Amino acid sequence: MWREASALKLELRGITKRFGSLVANDSIDLSVEPGEIHCLLGENGAGKSTLMNVLYGLLQPDGGEIAVDGEPVRFGDPGDAMAAGIGMVHQHFMLVPVFTVAENVMLGNEHVRAGGFLDRARARREVSEMSSRYGLDVDPDALVEDLPVGVQQRVEIIKALVRDARVLILDEPTAVLTPQETNELMEVMRQLTESGTSIVFITHKLREVKAVADRITVIRLGKVVATTSPDASESELASMMVGRDVSLSLDKEAAQPGEATFSVRDLCVVDDRGQLVVDHLSLDVRRGEIMAVAGVQGNGQTELVEALMGLQERVTGSAVLEGHELVGRSTRQVLDAGVGYVPEDRKVDGLVPTFSVAENLVLDLHEKRPYAAGPSYRPAVVREKAAELVREFDVRTSSVDTLVSTLSGGNQQKVVVAREMSRPLKLFIAAQPTRGLDVGSIEFVHRRILEERDRGNPVLIVSTELDEVYALADRIAVMYRGQVVGIVGPDTPRDDMGLMMAGVPLQHAASGQPDARSDSAGGAP
Amino acid sequence: MSLVRDLRSRALSGGGALLTVLALVLALLISAVLIVFSDPDVLEALPYFFAYPPDTFAAMWESVSSAYWALFTGSIVDPGAQSVRGFFAPLSETLVNATPLIAAGLAFGLPFRTGLFYIGGEGAIVLGAICAGYVGFAWDLPIVIHLLVAVAAGLLGGAVWGGIPGLLKARTGAHEVITTIMLNYVALYLIAYLLTTSAFQRPGRSDPISPVIDASAQMPALVPGLRVHVGLVFVLIAAGVVSWLLTRSTLGFRLRAVGSNPDAARNAGMGVGRSYVEVMLIAGALAGLAGAVEALGTQRTLTGGISAGLGFDAITVALLGRSRPLGTVLAGLLFGALRAGGIDMQAETGTPVDIILVVQSLVVLFIAAPPLVKSVFRVRAVEADGLAPATKGSSL
Amino acid sequence: MSTTTSGLASAAPDHDITPTVRERGWKNAIIFAVLGLIAPLAFGLGSPAGATSTFEVTLPDAVLFIEPIGVPSQTAALALGLLCLALAGFAVFRELRGFRTPRTVAAVFGVAWVLSFLCWAVADKSISMVGLLQGSLLLAVPLVFGALSGVLSERAGVINIAIEGQLLAGAFLSAVVASVSDNVYLGLLAAPVAGLLIGLLLAVFTIRYVVDQIIVGVVLVVFVVGLTSFLYGRLLAPQADVFNTPETFSSIAIPLLSDIPLLGAVLFEQSIIVYLMYGAVALVHVAIFHTRWGLRVRSVGEHPQAADTVGINVYRTRFRQVALGGAMAGLGGAFFTLGQVGAFGEQMTSGKGFIALAAMIFGRHRPLGALGAALLFGFADNLQSYLSIIGTPIPSQFMLMVPYLVTVFAVAGLVGRHRPPAAIGRPYIKS
C-alpha cells in the first residue's frame, strides 16, 4: 500500500561523467530540498539528461557522489535509485505499448500471489487509487498504445508514485503537452510538493521555469553556471543558458505572400493499424509565406507530411503543387516536382550513418547527372559539390569524407538542410526542423528557412514546439486528430492556441475574440 | 616479452587480417583437441596415461599431425606426387571446391550489405542447377553457345528463386530469413520430385539422377587433366561485377544506403522495396551461378544432393570475407582448401571431413567477436568490423 | 476559398477516429473462396462414383473397439465439400463487410475440408485415423519443443535461429549418454544440457559480444551439424555398440484416458517425452502470461529500456531466456533418438528446427498457438507419408512442401496478421 511520502533531501556533489573525450557533466553540484520544485535549465546537449540518468542509476558517474539526507549513496541501477525514493518520468516514455496501464505500473514492482502469479486486481486498485488521489483520470485496463501521449505521461507519473517516489524527476515533460495540459501538469506538481514530494523539473523553456520553479539551476556545456530564483528575468535566464545575449525572437520581415501555389484538399491517410490519422484535411500555402502546422505530437502531422512526400501508402484526396498532383506519386517524383523535405528525425529519417558527409549530401541526387554517368556513380564530382555545400551551409566537418554519424546534431541537421535546399525548389517542407538542436544551430536553420520563404517559395513547417511556430509562422494551422481545427495568425494568444490544440475550434475557444481573425487568416487565392 | 605483446597488439589493432589468422589458429587448435580426444588410438592410450605418458602423447601427436598434414597435402600441393600434374592436383581440388563457395558467398554478401539476410542460397543453388542442368542435357545447341545458354538458364532459375522472397519482403514485409529458409526446402523437394519424372530421370535408372550433361554444355577444364574448370572464371567475373556494383555504381550506392538506413533512403526518393527485389534477384542469380557451375562443371549431372549444404557453408564464407567481394573470394579459397583437404584427410586418416564445418563456424564466431580473440591472446584494441548487427535490428 | 470551414472545425472535438479499416478482408475472402470451391469441385466431383472410403477410428485391439466406418466417397466428399462452400460463403460475406471470421467457423471449415480431401484421397481404400493422428502428434513433438524454445528466447527479444542446432545437439548427447550409461533417463537428462550449451553460446555471442542474432544462430547450426557429424563419423559409427545404442522409451498408457476412442490412443498412450511436452506447453503458457517472471520477460522483449528503468536486468533476463530456450529445444532433441529411432544419425533433425521456428511464428509467439501450428505441420507431414503408402495422385514431394509453403504464406501475411515482440533482433545497449 501507498504510504505518505516522507520528505527527503537530495544532493549531488561534484558529479562528473565523461563519454570518451566529451565531458558531459563537469563536477556538477545540485541540491534538492524537500518539497521544492527545482528546475534544471539548459539547452539541448547541455548535459541535463546525462545528469539525471546518473542520478537515476542508469549511468555510473566518473566522479563525485550522490547523497540522500546527507548520507552518501551509490545507485548501481535504477532499482537502487527507486529504493532510495527517486522516481523518473523520462522524456521518451518508458512504457511497454502492448501492456495495459496496470501492467506497466506494476512492472518491476509486482505484487504476486503464491507461485509467482501476478496479482492484477491489486495493481488495478493501486492505479485507480493513485489516479483519483491526484485527479489523473487513468483507466488501469487500457492498453498504453491506445492512449494519447498526455495520458501516457500520467501513467508514468503514477508509475513513480506507486513506488513511493519522494523525489520525482520530470525530463522535458511538457514537450508533448498542450499549454492547458502543461498547466494541469504544473497543478499536479504543486499538489505533489504539498504532500512532501520534491520535483526536479528539466526543461529548456523559460516560461515554464518562471511559472513553477522554487529554485533554478542553469547548466551549460556540462557545468553549473548559476543557481538562481524564478525572479530572474527570461532574458537573464536565456543568456545564462546560452552563454551570450540572445534575442528571444527571430528578426524577420513581414511576409509578402503571393498566390497559393500549393493546395491540399480533403487529404485522408490511413495508417498501418488501420486508423484514419489524417481526416479530410485541406489547406493552402502561398508563395512567400510560412505555414506552420502546430499541434500536440501524434495528431497526424507526421502522417500528413509523409503523405505529401509519397511515403504513406493509403492516401486519398489531393495535393496540388503548381498544377501538379502529388498524391499517388512516388517520393522520387515528389522530389523531382521541386519539393525540398527535411524529415522529422534526422538520424532516423534523414541521414545514412555509414555514409560520408559527401554521400549524404547527394542522397537524393546520386542517380542524376552530373553525379552519375549512366549506371556509374562519380564520387569525384560528388565530393566537389559537397565541398561547396559544406562551405555554404557552414557544416563543421574535418572533410567531406568524414562519416556523417560523427558530426554533432546541429551539423548533421545542416547537412540535411543543405541537401534539401540544393535543388531548385517550388515548395519547402520541414518537420520539427530544430528538434534537439542548440540555440546557435536553431538560429541558423530558422534563418535558412526564412530565406527560402523570402525567395518566394511556399514553406510548410510542422512543429510541436509552440515557440518555433510563433517564431517562424506567417499563418498557423492547428491540427487535432487528423483535422485542421483552425488556421490563425501568429498573433493568436497562447491560451487560444492551446485550446485549439486540444480540439476546441477558435470561436468556442476564444469567445469575445473577433471572429474575423480566422477568416482573415484563412487565406484566399 | 613486452615486445611480443606489443607486436601482437599492434598487428591486431591494425586490421582484420591478423585477427582472421588468429581466429583461424584458434579454430584449428580447438578442432585439434576434438580430433585428439575422439581418436580411438588416443582413447585407448588414455587409461594408462599415468603409467606411461609418452604413449598417449605419441598417439595424440600422431593423430593431429597426420590429420593436418593430410589437410595440407589435399589442398595445396602433394609432395609425394609422381607427376607435376599430380603435384598440383590438390590446388586444383581447392579451386574446384572454392568455385561454388565464392559464388554462393557473394549471394549472401551482397544482400547483407543491403541489410538483408539471404539464407536462401541453398534453394537458389538447386534451382540454378535444375535449370542449367536441364538445358545442359535436354537441349541440343552448338558448342560454346550451349554452355552460355545453360549458364544463363542457371542464373535465371536462381534469380527467380531469389526474387520471390525479395518480392514478398517488398510487398508484404515477410521476413526474408523465414521465407528463404522455407523456400530452400521447397526447392529440395522440387528437385527430388523432378528427378522422378521422365523429363529429368536418366533413362534406365531407377534412382533419382539425371542424364549426363552434354559435352557441349560441360565447363571445360582450365588445365587438361585437372578438375579445375571454366566455372572459376565465371565466378571471378561475377566477383568483379559485384565489386563494381557496390563501389562504383548508382545501384550499389542505393543498395548500401538502403542497407544502412532504409528510412533515410526512402525519404531521399529511393525505392526501398524495389531495392530489395533487385538485390534478391541478383543474389539469387549468383547462387544460381553456384548451382550451374556445380551441375555443368563439377558434377556434370543432377542429383538430389547437388547443393550439399553449400548454401550454409557459403554464409560462413561471406561472413569471413566481411561481405566484400575480394574478401569473399579469399575466404572462398580458404574454405575451399579446407574442404578439398578435408576430403583427403578423411580418406587417409579416417578423420571425418565434417570437422571443417567446425573450423569454419568457429572462425566466423571468433572474427565476429574480436574481444574474445583479444582476451584469448591477451592483447588490446581490436576493432570490430563487418559483423556488427544491422543498424535497424531485424525482426522475425 | 477558406481552407478550413468552421463546419469541419467544429466537428473536430466530438469526431471520433474512424474505427479500424478492415484491410485484409479481401485477402481472407479470396482464400476462403478458393478453398471453398476446391472442396466440392475437386474432391467431391473428383471422387470415383460408387467407391467407398473406409476410416478406422480405433486400433484393432482397443478396449472400446469401434467398427471401421465406411462412407461412399463421392457423396461424403461432396457433402463435406458443400459444407465447406457454405461456410466459405458465410466467411466471404462477413469478411467483405469488414468482420472477422469467427474461429470456430474457420476451425469447422478446416476440419471439413481435410475430411473431404481424405474421402477423395482414400476412395476404395482404408485409412487408420488413429495411426494418422498418432503419427501426426509424434512428428509434432520436436516441433513443439523447438517452437517453445523460440518462444522463450524471442519473447525476451533474442531471435533463436539455432533451434535446429539445439535439437541436433540434444539428440546427439542424449543418445550417447543413454548408450554409454545404459540408462535412458540419464540420456533424457543429458539432452537439455546439450541444448543449454548451444543456448549459452548463442547468449554469449549475441548479448556479451553483441554479434547479430541471426548470424550467430545460422553459424551455430553449421557448428552443431559439423560437430555432431564429425563425432558420429569418428566414434558413433565405428563403435555403435558403445556409443549409439540407446534404449528408447516405451509408451505409457494412462488408465481410463487412454480408453477413449480415437483420442485416447492418440493422446494418452505415448512415451514420457510426449507427456513432458504437454507439461511444457502448459507451463510456458501460464508462466509467460500470468506470472511476474513472464511479465518481465515480455517487457524485456518489447521495450528493454523501459524494463531497465524499473530495475529489471535486461542482459541477465535475456541470457537466462536464451539458455532456457536452448535447454527446451535440447529436450526436444531427445525425442529423435530416445523417443523414436533408437540411434543417432547424421543431421537426423533434417530441418525440423526451422519448421519449429515457423511454427512459433505461425503460432504468433504464443505457446498454444505454436502447439497448434506444430500439430498442423505434423499432420501434413504424416498425411503425406500415409498417402504415399496407400498411393494417391499427389506426388509425396508436394505434400512435403506443404508446411514450408504454409509458412511462407503465413509470414507474407496472407493468413492472419502477426506482431512479434517489438525489440526482437535488436541488441540492448545502455545509453
Image (tube, coloured by chain):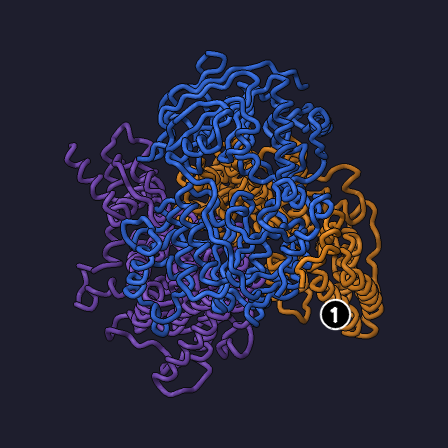
Give residue A69's position: percent from left, percent from top: 50, 12
Q: Which chain is tinted orange?
A: C
Quarter holding residue A381: bottom left
Quarter holding residue A44: top left
Closer to the camera, C254 or A273? A273
Amino acid type of the residue that numbered disc 1 sits on in the rendered structure: Ile
> Element under label 1?
helix
Residue placed under numbered mark 1 in the picture: C38
Closer to the camera, A270 or A201? A201
Give residue B321's position: percent from left, percent from top: 32, 55
Image side of residue B251 versus residue C273, left or right: left
Residue at 68 percent across and 69 percent down: it is: C392
Residue at 38 percent across and 74 percent down: it is: B296
Closer to the camera, A70 or A140? A70
Quarter holding residue A510: top right
Give residue A168's position: percent from left, percent from top: 56, 25
Q: Colour in which chain B is shown? A: purple
Q: Which chain is tinted blue?
A: A
Residue at 65 percent across and 65 percent down: it is: A317
Residue at 39 percent across and 57 percent down: it is: A418
